[in-house]
Image (cartoon, grey):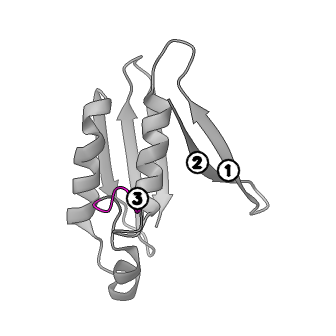
Amino acid sequence: MRTWGRTTDEYGNKTWVEVATDANGYNDAVYITDLCQCLLLNLAEDPFFADYGIPAQRSVMTQIFPDYYTYYTQSKFTQYFVLLIVKKLPSPTPTYSIRAVTHSGAIIETNIPI
């Protein structure tokens, strides 16, 4: 299994990176990358999975967090982790904190600015 995720280096350059199943057969990195990409999608932007994503443009305009859509996206990915928590951070720009416990016991924590 594999997916692609976009990263940004310290100079602001964006590149696409392939994320695949690890040597032990775990897909945790693939699913966490997909979750991050889904949180960056606008609602109905993906032609195959129109129910994924959040209404980010409307959220930026109104400065209201899209909690329902965020938790809906979280519920789609919860089955792939031992524990998955997505919560909003108290910041001036919409930002979400993701904390996941993988099947191998590793803890992944990251912040996603929307």
Whether label 1 touches label 2, CB < 8 Å: yes
Q: Find the distance from the CA under tag 2 to the CA under tag 3.
A: 12 Å
Residue toward you, 107 or 53: 53
Q: Residue at x 33, y 73 (%)?
A: 55
Position of residue 81 relative to residue 4, above or below, is above
Choose top left, top right, bottom left or bottom right for residue 13.
bottom right
Q: Magenta region's main secondary structure?
A: loop
Crowding around mark 3 (Cα neighbors within 10 Å: few <14, some 14 to 19, many 20+) is: many
Residue at disc 3, secondary structure = helix
Nearer to us in this view, 69 or 91: 69
Location of residue 103 with respect to 9 vertically, above or below = above
Sequence-earlier tag: 1 or 2: 2
Image location (x, y in percent) of residue 36: 46, 51
Tag 1: residue type? Trp
Residue tagged 1 = 16
Q: Which residues are magenta?
A: 47-51
Of 85 and 2, the residue lying toward us: 2
- Quarter of the image where one finds residue 53: bottom left
Residue 5 numbered mark, or none: 2
Measured as percent of width and height from the top left, residue 50 is found at 32, 62
Q: Residue at x 42, y 16 (%)?
A: 104
Q: CA distance from mark 1 to mark 3?
A: 17 Å
Question: Disc 1 or 3, which lies upstream in sequence?
Answer: 1
Q: In x, y percent, where is residue 2? A: 54, 34
Q: Which element carries disc 1, helix, strand or loop?
A: strand
Residue 56 magenta-highlighted: no
Q: Earlier in the sequence, mark 2 or mark 3?
A: 2
Q: Dot 1: within a 10 Å radius of its alpha carbon, few (fewer than 14), some, or many (20 or more) residues?
A: few
Which mark identifies residue 39?
Answer: 3
The residue that appears at 44% across and 40% down in the rendered structure is 32
Secondary structure of the residue carrying numbered label 2:
strand
Q: Amino acid at mark 3?
A: Leu
